[in-house]
Image (tube, rainbow, N blue to C red):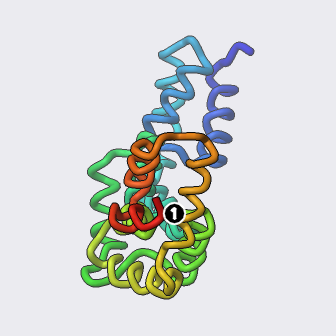
Amino acid sequence: MKYNFDTLKNYALWYYFRYFPSRKKLLEKLKEKSQDREISEKVFENISHLFQEEQVIWDKIRLYLLRNKNLKYITGKLLEKWFEKDMIQEILENNFLREGESLLNEKSLFIKIENYKNAGKSIQYVKQKLIERQEDREMIEKIIDDIFYDGEDENLKKELEKLQHKGLEKQKIIQKLLQKGFQYNEIKKYL
């Protein structure tokens, strides 16, 4: 389809209000749609008064937090969508990050850690995956203690069986289990 100013503007408005992309992403999308760079830039300028990038970032952060996503995930996703790193950091620091307060939701975290345990993950793996800020540490460690109340022996045994069924040699099994976050002295008990 050949785009003129009006059809490209309609597309730009639809795309913006459907996906709420960053300014950079929208401009790139317009340039993809129309080979005429000049029309793309005119359309972009014509609707640029509608852009509320800070509000969009704030809303997207809020949505990720409701889905119990951690800081690294949130920042990564927003950068992937071409939002400016400085703006992301500023919004996070001014509106979301509070000293002594975790961003994570305890109930969701409990379910996530339970799922990790059921998937055979080690305590160390869970900690590395979830603890990003000092504010998260206490809550995560408490939940880990509740869920892994009898330790991680059961998960270690499951992972050990899987690796033994693959016919791997002892040293390779130890190496794989260490990579999964299990402790060497615990591994030696079962080998």
Q: Is residue 36 visible?
A: yes
State the image quarter where residue 101 is shown.
Answer: bottom left
Position of residue 29 measured from the top left corner of the image (x, y, whole percent): 56, 28
Q: Is residue 90 left or right of residue 145?
A: left
Q: Is residue 138 left or right of residue 31?
A: left
Position of residue 49 measured from the top left corner of the image (x, y, whole percent): 46, 46
Position of residue 154 measured from the top left corner of the image (x, y, whole percent): 56, 72
- Characterize the local packing of mark 1: few (<14), some (14-19) or many (20 or more) Cα atoms within 10 angstroms: many
Q: In what quadrant of the picture does the N terminus appear? A: top right
**Considering only vertical position in the picture, is 136 above or below 72?**
below
Kind of residue at disc 1: Lys
Query: Closer to the camera, 82 or 164?
Result: 164
At 68% across and 34% down in the image, what residue appears? 10
At 47% across and 24% down in the image, what residue appears? 41
Query: Closer to the camera, 71 or 123?
Result: 123
Position of residue 178 measured from the top left corner of the image (x, y, whole percent): 38, 54
Total marks in image = 1
Residue with the mark numbered 1: 121
At 50% across and 69% down in the image, what residue appears? 65
Secondary structure of the residue carrying tag 1 is loop
Query: Closer to the camera, 150 or 91?
Result: 150
State the image quarter where residue 118 is shown.
Answer: bottom right
